Image: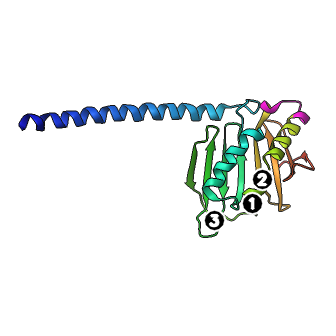
């Protein structure tokens, strides 16, 4: 009996050590993937600036907050996206983050005064890709030159817009359907 009582703590310590090592390795792998997602370029085949990759990511957001969610803004980077959802209909403001591998995190977000919202269901992935590609073409670069695309309401005009930002170059904005592309005014 006493021998059993001495081996149980040893087994618990060894088991805890193995579990800690597994969690540590898993965390390291997750951190390395997040780092790779942040370094992804717009022209990469797995880029979320491509409609075929953006559709599943937006479906993941919809699965968490519903297709009728009101977005304060949606920022799409080549390796991940961030959807800031306004409070309403009995829910608190949330920030939904989706990595290119489909990993979804929902975080609380401050409920700040917004200038308007865009319904998640109104977001067209093909329009976003089209705006990013055309902005890159006009700046004489490929999709690798596109830093991000943002879907939001433009505060001064109160119009829903897609804005593509290119590294150190200008930003380009278009209507939500992708039409009317023009160089964005600097603010």
Q: Is the Cβ of the residue at disc 1 closer than 8 Å to that at disc 2?
A: yes
Residue with the mark numbered 2: 123
**Regarding mark 3 in the picture, which secondary structure is present there?**
loop
Report how many numbered discs are placed on residues in the image.
3
Q: x and y percent of residue 70 in the render?
A: 70, 62
Residue at left 68%, top 44%? 56
Q: Is residue 49 visible?
A: no
Residue closest to the far bottom = 90
**Segment colored magenta:** 137-144
Distance, label 2 to label 3, CA atoms, is 19 Å
Q: x and y percent of residue 41 in the render?
A: 72, 31
Distance, label 1 to label 3, CA atoms, is 13 Å
For residue 110, side relative to residue 163 (left or right): left
Check residue 157 for magenta coloring.
no
Among the 4 quarters of the image, the one containing residue 9 = top left
Are there few (<14), some (14-19), or many (20+) residues within 10 Å of tag 1? Answer: some
Say which of marks 1 and 3 sits in front.
Answer: 1
For residue 149, side relative to residue 173 (left or right): left
Q: Is 106 placed above or below 158 here?
A: above
Among the 4 quarters of the image, the one containing residue 102 = top right
Residue with the mark numbered 1: 119
Q: x and y percent of residue 5 in the render?
A: 11, 38
Residue at left 77%, top 51%? 151
């Amino acid at each position: 009996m006493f021998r059993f009582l001495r081996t149980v703590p040893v087994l618990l310590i060894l088991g805890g050590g193995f579990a800690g090592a597994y969690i540590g390795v898993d965390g390291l792998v997750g951190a390395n993937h997040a780092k790779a997602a942040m370094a992804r370029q717009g022209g990469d085949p797995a880029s979320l600036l491509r409609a075929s990759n953006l559709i599943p990511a937006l479906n993941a957001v919809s699965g968490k907050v519903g297709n009728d969610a009101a977005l304060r803004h949606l920022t799409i980077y080549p390796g991940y996206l961030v959807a800031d959802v306004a409070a309403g209909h009995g829910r608190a403001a949330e920030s939904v983050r989706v990595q290119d591998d489909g990993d979804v995190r929902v975080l609380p977000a401050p409920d700040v005064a917004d200038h308007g919202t865009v319904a998640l269901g109104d977001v067209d992935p093909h329009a976003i890709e089209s705006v990013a590609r055309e902005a890159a073409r006009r700046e004489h670069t490929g999709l690798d030159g596109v830093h991000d695309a943002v879907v939001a309401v433009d505060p001064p005009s109160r119009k829903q817009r897609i804005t593509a930002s290119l590294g150190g170059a200008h930003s380009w904005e278009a209507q939500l359907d992708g039409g009317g592309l023009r160089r964005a005014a600097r603010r």
